[in-house]
Amino acid sequence: MIRFLALGVFLAAAGQAVAAELRVRVTELRIDDGGVHFALYATPESFPKKDDRHAGAEVKAKDGGAIWVFRGLAPGRYAVAVYHDENGNGEFDQGFFGIPLEGYAFSNGATAFFSAPGFDEAAVTVGEGITEIVIEMAY
């Protein structure tokens, strides 16, 4: 009986996907005030809609940057969008014609021109284990 239980536990564990981590380091913050908002997207249809993100977090800006780790991911393609809420009001502040007043950036060095880049431009491949990326903040 114990052998069958042990075999069952082994087979159940073997059938599960290996969890992956995506470590995102944001650099080039112009000030250490406020927080850096991280948003992770798993599909082109959701990117970069705030309410459709796969996961998100906010981290205090420190020493010109911020780090967040997305854990428990299935290996695959993901895109990351970040913004620096410099004044801590919880919003991505924009001025006339929607011109950003606070820093923002996307994974894979994707750039925005009148709108966010496409998912494929910002997508990074997350394999089994740990994947690390660096995103330089744009102003």
Image (cartoon, rainbow, N blue to C red):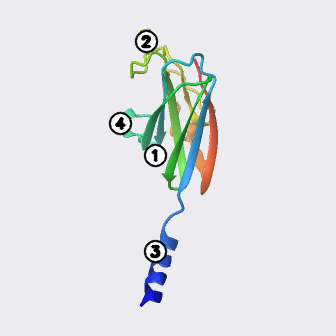
| 4 or 3: tag closer to the N-terminus | 3
Q: In screen coordinates, is 44 left or right of 66?
A: left
**Mark 2, secondary structure of its residue:** helix
Residue found 41% across the figure and 40% down from its top: 53
Residue 51: assigned label: 4
Question: What residue does disc 3 label?
Answer: 12
Of tags 3 and 2, which is closer to the observer? 3
Disc on the earlier residue, 1 or 2: 1
**Residue 57 in view in this figure:** yes
Q: Comparing marks 4 and 3, which lies closer to the viewer?
A: 3
Residue drawn at the location 62% of the way across and 37% of the way down = 108
Circle on res. 43: 1
Cα distance in 3D space between marks 1 and 4: 13 Å
| Percent x, y of residue 91 | 39, 21
For label 2, the residue is 97
- Amino acid residing under circle 1: Thr
- What's the CA distance linking mark 4 and mark 3? 34 Å
Rate crowding at label 4 as few (under 14), some (14 to 19) or many (20 or more) other CA atoms within 10 Å. few
- Camera sees residue 47: no
Measure the alpha-carbon separation of dots 1 and 2. 28 Å
